[in-house]
Image (cartoon, helix red, strand yellow):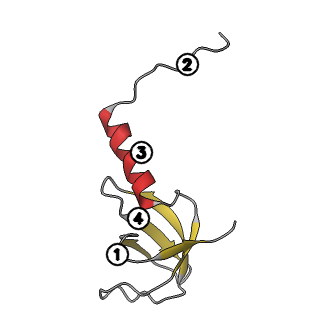
Amino acid sequence: MAGEADTRRMDTQGARLLAARLRAGVAIGARIELVEAPRDDSGLCAGDRGIVDQIDEDGRVVVTWDRGFASEIDPHATPIHTLAA
């Protein structure tokens, strides 16, 4: 019916994942570029580019990098820039 709100409820798992995706500030499938190298031994460098594959409940992002490997980053500790599609 026109004008009726969708009142279905989201389960708690779905709500946590949605909140994590919003906190991460990037969508699955987005192309990103590192603004700064992470402060770890991941081997990533500023300017590395990749595609976001997953976002976990804590807002950590799994990226498949153009250099041929996947790794997890924290977008709040490692600045990223979303690239145009």
Q: Residues within 10 Å of mark 3 (few under 14, many from 20)?
A: some
Quickly name the residue at label 3. Answer: 18
Nearest to viewer (mark 4 / mark 1): 1
2 and 3 marks in contact (CB < 8 Å): no
Helix, strand or loop at mark 4: strand
Q: Which mark is residue 77?
A: 1
How far apart in space, not on screen, are marks 1 and 3 (Cα)? 20 Å
Asked if residue 2 lies left or right of residue 25, the reply is right
Q: Amino acid at mark 1?
A: Ala
Q: Amino acid at mark 4?
A: Val
Image point (65%, 9%), residue name: 1
Quickly name the residue at label 4. Answer: 61
Q: Amino acid at mark 2?
A: Ala
Q: Residues within 10 Å of mark 2 (few under 14, many from 20)?
A: few
Q: Position of residue 37 (x, y in %)?
A: 42, 87
Q: Position of residue 19 (x, y in %)?
A: 38, 47
Image point (49%, 88%), residue name: 46
Quickly name the residue at label 2. Answer: 5
Helix, strand or loop at mark 2: loop
How far apart in space, not on screen, are marks 4 and 2 (Cα)? 32 Å
Chain-order first, disc 4 or disc 2: 2
How far apart in space, not on screen, are marks 2 and 3 (Cα)? 20 Å
Chain-order first, disc 1 or disc 2: 2
Q: Amino acid at mark 3?
A: Leu
How far apart in space, not on screen, are marks 4 and 1 (Cα)? 11 Å
Above or below: residue 4 compared with residue 26: above
Helix, strand or loop at mark 3: helix
Nearest to viewer (mark 4 / mark 2): 2
Asked if residue 79 lies left or right of residue 83, the reply is left
Helix, strand or loop at mark 1: loop
